[in-house]
Image (cartoon, helix red, strand yellow):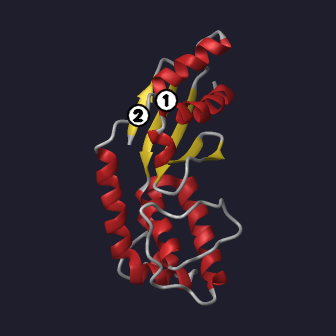
């Protein structure tokens, strides 16, 4: 996780291993949650090896876990305690999926983190300066958390006033990234 800051603002930028693990579990089981943010499939794609035949219960359990992990952030990793995942006792279908696929999900997430570590972060400070110039003043104090996801497309999802999920592909396109982030920063600066 990187932190960029100025006199009145702080932006954290990085990945969340727990979200990568959650997306891996979703994709390997071909879950289709309906009551949560619709996030595309992982890139590189994960092979469906354990499709849940009646996935609605598992998908609902996954959706609840996803929503919690997104709001809690990296601290949600504390719930992932192999081999039994006792913290998921009230979600037995999801608990079973975690027991079967956690090791593979963790390897996948760690590999993505290694790839990201070799990349430079986006020019967040420059984007804030452009916003400050357009509004004619220094930014008001704000904090913003940008969490990268290795999923398809150039997309961003504002999941809270101070939290945005962004795709790796969006981050790698500096102009699109700036165009996406600018109005978000304008709304909080």
Query: Is the C-beta separation of discs 2 and 1 under 8 Å?
Result: yes
Crowd around label 2: few <14 · some 14–19 · many ≥20 (10 Å) = few
* Residue appearing at x 55%, y 30% in the figure: 178
Mark 2 vs 1, N-terminal side: 2
Q: Which quadrant of the view contains residue 104?
A: bottom left
Crowd around label 1: few <14 · some 14–19 · many ≥20 (10 Å) = some
**Is 113 rendered above or below residue 138?**
below
Report x, y in % for residue 101.
Answer: 40, 79
Q: Nearer the viewer, residue 11 or 49?
A: 49
Residue sticking out furthest to the top: 136
Report x, y in % for residue 82.
Answer: 36, 77
Q: Which quadrant of the view contains residue 81?
A: bottom left
Quadrant where the N terminus is found in the figure: top left
* Residue appearing at x 48%, y 33% in the figure: 174
* Residue appearing at x 63%, y 74% in the figure: 32
CA distance separating discs 2 and 1? 7 Å
- Rendered image: mark on residue 3: 2
Left or right of 25? Residue 53 is right
Secondary element type, mark 2: strand
Q: Residue under circle 1?
A: 10
Left or right of 12? Residue 163 is right
């Amino acid at each position: 996780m990187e932190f960029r800051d100025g006199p009145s603002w702080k932006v954290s930028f990085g990945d969340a291993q727990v979200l990568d693990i959650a997306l891996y579990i979703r994709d390997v089981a071909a879950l289709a949650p309906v009551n949560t943010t619709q996030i595309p499939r992982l890139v590189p794609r994960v092979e469906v090896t354990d499709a849940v035949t009646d996935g609605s219960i598992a998908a609902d359990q996954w959706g609840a876990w996803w929503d919690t992990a997104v709001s809690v952030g990296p601290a949600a990793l504390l719930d992932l305690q192999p081999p039994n995942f006792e913290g998921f006792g009230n979600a037995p279908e999801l608990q079973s999926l975690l027991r079967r696929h956690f090791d593979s999900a963790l390897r996948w997430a760690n590999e993505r983190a290694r790839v990201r570590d070799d990349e430079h972060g986006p020019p967040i400070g420059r984007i804030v300066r452009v916003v400050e110039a357009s509004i004619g003043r220094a930014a008001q104090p704000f904090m913003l958390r940008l969490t990268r996801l290795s999923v398809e497309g150039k997309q961003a999802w504002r999941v809270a006033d101070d939290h945005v999920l962004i795709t790796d592909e969006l981050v790698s396109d500096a102009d699109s990234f700036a165009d996406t982030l600018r109005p978000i920063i304008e709304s909080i600066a």
